[in-house]
Image: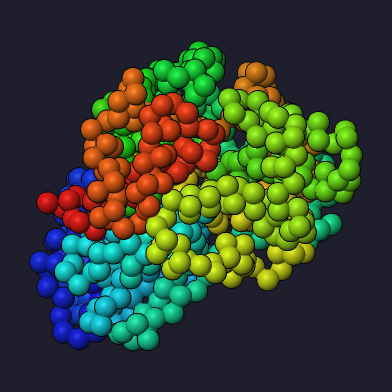
Amino acid sequence: MCGIAGILRSHGQVARAPLEDMIRRLHHRGPDGQGFHTDGPLGLAHARLSIIDLAGGDQPIHNEDRSVWVVFNGEIFNHIELRQTLEQAGHRFYTLSDTEVIVHLYEQHGDRFVDHLNGQFAIALWDARQQRLILARDRTGIRPLFYHWSSQRLAFASEVKALMALPDTPRQLNLPALGETFTYWAPLPGHTVFEGIQALPPGHLMVIDERGQSGARTERYWDWAFPAVGMETRRSADDLADELRELLIDAVRLQLRADVPVGAYLSGGLDSSIITSLIKHFTDTPLRTFSLAFEDEEFDESAYQQDMARYLGTEHTALRCKRSDIAAAFPRAVWHAESPLVRTAPAPMMMLAGSVREAGFKVVLTGEGADEVFGGYDLFKEASVRRFMARQPTSKMRPALMERLYPYLRHSPAANRVMAQRFFSEGSEHLGQPHFAHGPRWATTRRMWQFFTPEVRQSLAGVDHLAAIAPHLPPDIGQWAALSQDQYIEAHTLMSGYLLSSQGDRPAMAHSIEGRFPFLDHRVIEFANRLPPRYKLMGLTEKYLLKRSMTGLLPEGIRTRTKQPYRAPDSASFFEGGQPVDYVADLLSPARVADAGYFDPKAVSKLFEKCRAGRAIGFGDNMAFVGILSTMLLHEQFIQGQAFQ
């Protein structure tokens, strides 16, 4: 796990000084060392977090004749098996690192080397003979990779702040992408909220054969794919549960590979409990677990965490998080996320990573991804109920199903029958469209647009958030089951854009912690995608087959527990006894809001007073408050440059 950066010039040679400036901004991703390689028009830089081959794994890494060079952020979990195959084919290795398999795989398979990797990665590979650069990102977008073209060069890096070390990188927010963030929680694939800076999408390669932007091509090498309706596997649930259990055991074993101690997050929910249980029962790795607890009972799951820790007999550390802690950590969380946030949840995750680091660990396994892969989110149940209701819209009985949703929410959209009927019927005209499940959520989030200035709203006029998603969908998605369509969109918007970034890679790497995600092993995803939808969502029972595969390995109260998503206190975190935190009062003052130019000062002031009085209602008010505050922080840190002083 590391940070990478590089420059490919159209003309002339790359100097080392700008590479040093870039990689210095990524010290938190790789505090254990730096490495550089320059070759005429190409320069590579690396900040290392030592996890595998501690003594010999320094990057950049090269092949036998130094004609192929690579810098790499992430882990290749099947590197031992790949090394054996490559050595049998005649390749010679000079390190024990997982990085070195990349250069030899490229020699053996060309651009299709990525097909052989089981891992999480952002890769920059330079073929000196052919003068070609390849950038690659892992299948699901666990590790980030950004780039910026100018007239003279391509610059790329693990984080935007490294690109902004270069003087010709623009410092301006991209308003269309800001509108996307205030709709989907994150910019759409390939976009960032920074003008002129793009992200390599998950599962993609960028190949630059000739220098200059015209010589670059981007191609997808992997994607989530589902069979047409009726073409799913027909094997029995028992057989599939057995296969799934063995597949997850192997995924966990692979992801435990490290030359440093490995810990695990334990939230008290099903997914992290599965990972910790598999570590305990099927590996020799000592089990060390970490969790978050909250002073607010609505968000706290510590009782379940303690039950699971006792069941496993693990050494367990719980970090207790107060509202004031969230407020104090939030500016740093935004700086690392490099994106507006509409929830405070990343801040406690960053604090948790800090406690892991303090305990002497660099690596943790987490349960992230299980909900997207096995149909665990309320969104999927909600969409199922909405489709069921739409078939008989006048039914008096069917709306009662809504009352079974969101039992953990204090202000549930299903709490009031009339309001629930209105919420669940929103977007019913899109029944049969791939985005049907997500429409109400996106519409709710997009209400934050009312806080934009008239000028910003005018610049976004005509943007159709439902139409905007269409170019990102595969042509055969209409042949898939409804749940499969829901899963695809969830994986390509919220998961890759927000959960694996702002709530995954970024808060962990703020403390030089590598998160690993066994549920996102591509073999697990491909297995799950072949399942009949009923094996994921059985009525209103989420993750049916996953739960069945864990019979006997978890306490029944955990195995059958209804999903409760991770949340943290939002607007309430920034007020104490009606008094705002100092930096919040300053940033959201009418003068500061007007000066930044994104939001209407009067509208923001009304929201501010509403939240100060403790009258924030549900997701709408809270997301707006946090979204506005985080955008103002982002403006201060990146556009005005305060983070780089």
Check the image and report above or below for 585 versus 478.
Answer: above
Where residue 299 appears, as percent x and y from the top left, is: 49, 24
Q: How many marks?
A: 0
Q: Quadrant of residue 433?
A: bottom right
Residue 471 drawn above or below residue 244: below
Residue 416 in percent (x, y) is at 70, 29
Q: Residue furthest front?
A: 602
From the viewer's perspective, tell me whether residue 173 is left or right of residue 140: left
Residue 348 in the image: x percent, y percent?
Answer: 37, 32
Please report the residue visible at 59 percent of the width from the left and 28 percent of the height from the top. Answer: 411
Colour scheme employed for the rendering of this structure: rainbow
Q: In the rendering, at what x and y percent does residue 238 appear?
A: 78, 36
Whether residue 393 is visible here, answered yes or no, is yes
Does 620 sit left or right of 479 as displayed?
Answer: left
Residue drawn at x 41%, y 26% is 613
In depth, the one of 7 and 421 nearer the eye is: 421
Tell which of 618 and 129 is nearer to you: 618
Q: Residue at x 20, y 86 (%)?
A: 11
For residue 319, above or below residue 40: above
Q: In the drawing, does residue 86 fall left or right of residue 643?
A: right
Q: Is residue 123 visible?
A: no
Out of 70 and 462, give the one closest to the viewer: 462
Q: Residue at x 43, y 33 (%)?
A: 610
